[in-house]
Image: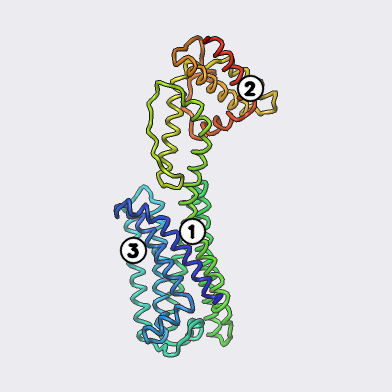
Amino acid sequence: MKDNLGFYVAGGLLLVACLLKLPALVRARGRDRLLSSICALLLVGAGVLFTSAPRTIILVNRATGVSNFSAPLVYCALTGFSAASVVLVLNWRGGPDKEHTRRLSRRIIALYLLVWILIVTLYVLGDASVERRTDFDVYYAGTPYIREMILLYLLAHGLASFLCSCLCWRWSRDVHGTMRIGLRALAAGYFMHYVGYDAAKLVAIAARWTGHHWDFLATGVAPSMGQPSALLVAVGFILPLVGRSSEDAIRYWQLGPLAKTVSRVHGAPTFRLLPLPWWNPKLRLRLTQRQTFISDRIVVCRGNFDRRIWSEAHAAAVAWGAGDEDAGVIAEAAMIAAAADTYAIADGRLSGDRVDPGGEGPSPTVSDLAQLSRALRTRVVRDIRRRHRLGSEGAAT
C-alpha cells in the first residue's frame, strides 16, 4: 500500500498542476499550442505514475489477460513523457529562430515514435510469459528481445531526461523569481530521473549479466528516486503559475496605500476596476490598472511638488536613521502625499512656484511605486502629512 501511495500522490500533483492550467486552456479555445502542450504533458505524466503503481500493474495485467502487458505500456508512457518534456521546454523557452525550434521538435517526436514502435515490436518478438510485477527489468535482463526492449527504453528515457535537465538549468540563469525556482526544480527532477532511476536500473541489469544479484537497485533504489523526482517535476510546473499570481497579489496589496493617497486627485483618466477575486488569472490586469491609476495622478499633481517638503522629509528620515537611498524614497513619498492632499483640499486649483526636486527623469517603475507606497506608512511621512494638511486647511479657510 505504501509503494502505491507514492505513485498516486506524485501523479495526483501532476494532475492538480494540469487542473490549475485548465481554465486558461478553456479560455484559449485551443489557440494556445504551448498551453495545450503543457496540459497534455501534465496529464500524460499523471497517467505514467498512475499506471506505474504496482496495484495498477496487477489490474491491467488481469484486465487484458496478457502477462506483463503493463511493461511495454509503462515503457512507452515513460519515454513519451520524456520526449514531450524536451519538446515542451524547447517551445516554452522559444528563441529567435522559431522554425529551427519547430524542426527540432518534429525530429524528437519522430525519433521517439520510432522508439515506441521498437518497444512494442521487441516485446512481441520476446518471451515474457512469467508475470513480474516489480522486478521485470532484472528478471528478464538476459532474455532475447526483452533485454533489448528494456535497454532501449532506459537509454531513451535517460537521454530525454538529460536534455531536459540541461535545458532547464541553462534557462534558469536568465530568469528570476518563481520562474527560476520552478526551472531549477524541473532540472533537479529530471536529473534524478537519469542519475537515480535509469542509472540504478542499468547497474542492476549489468550486475545480472555478470552473475551478481543487485536487484535491490531496480526494485528499491530506482522507485525511491522516481517518486521524488516526479514530485519535483510537478512543483516545477506548478510553482511558476501559482508564484506569478501570488507575486501579483502581493504587489497589488502593496500599492494600496499609495492608490488611496492619490485617489482624490482629479483630472486624470479614470478606470472602472474589474470586480475580480484575488485568485482570478486576470489579477495582472488589475495590477496594471492600479499602477496606471497611481502614475496618472502623480503626473497631474507633479506641478505642485514642493522642494521644501522633500528637503524636510529627507532630513527627518536621515535623523530617524534611514540610509540615503531610503531617505530619498521617504522624501519623495512625503512630497507626493503632500501634493495630493493639497490638490484635493484646493480642488485642483492650486499651483505655484513648486518644482520636482528630482528634475526630469524616467517614469517610476512598479518597484518604485511599491517602495513609495511602503514609505507612506513611516512615521516621518505621517508627521509631515499631518502638519502639511493642517497648514493647507488653515490657508484654504
Decide: is 5 above or below 244. Answer: below
Decide: is 255 above or below 130. Answer: above
Could you tell me residue 380's position as x and y percent?
A: 64, 24
Assign a secondary structure to mark 1.
helix
Could you tell me residue 89's position as x and y percent?
A: 42, 57
Q: Is residue 393 left or right of residue 284?
A: right
Between 316 and 275, which is closer to the camera in this rendering?
Answer: 275
Q: Residues within 10 Å of mark 3 (few under 14, many from 20)?
A: few
Question: Mark 1 sits on what residue?
Answer: 166
Q: Nearer the viewer, mark 1 or mark 2?
A: 2
Between 382 and 7, which is closer to the camera in this rendering?
Answer: 382
Assign a secondary structure to mark 2.
helix
Q: Residue at x 42, y 36 (%)?
A: 288
Snapshot quadrant of residue 218 = bottom right
Q: Residue at x 46, y 29 (%)?
A: 294
Quadrant of the drawing holding the N terminus: bottom right
In the rendered structure, which amino acid carries the disc numbered 1? Cys
Could you tell me residue 88's position as x and y percent?
A: 39, 58
Q: CA distance from mark 3 to mark 1?
A: 19 Å
Question: Mark 3 sits on what residue?
Answer: 107
Q: CA distance from mark 1 to mark 2?
A: 55 Å
Q: CA distance from mark 2 to mark 3?
A: 67 Å
Between 15 and 141, which is closer to the camera in this rendering?
Answer: 15
Q: Residue at x 54, y 74 (%)?
A: 222
In the rendered structure, which amino acid carries the disc numbered 2? Asp
Q: Which mark is residue 179?
A: none
Question: Mark 2 sits on what residue?
Answer: 383
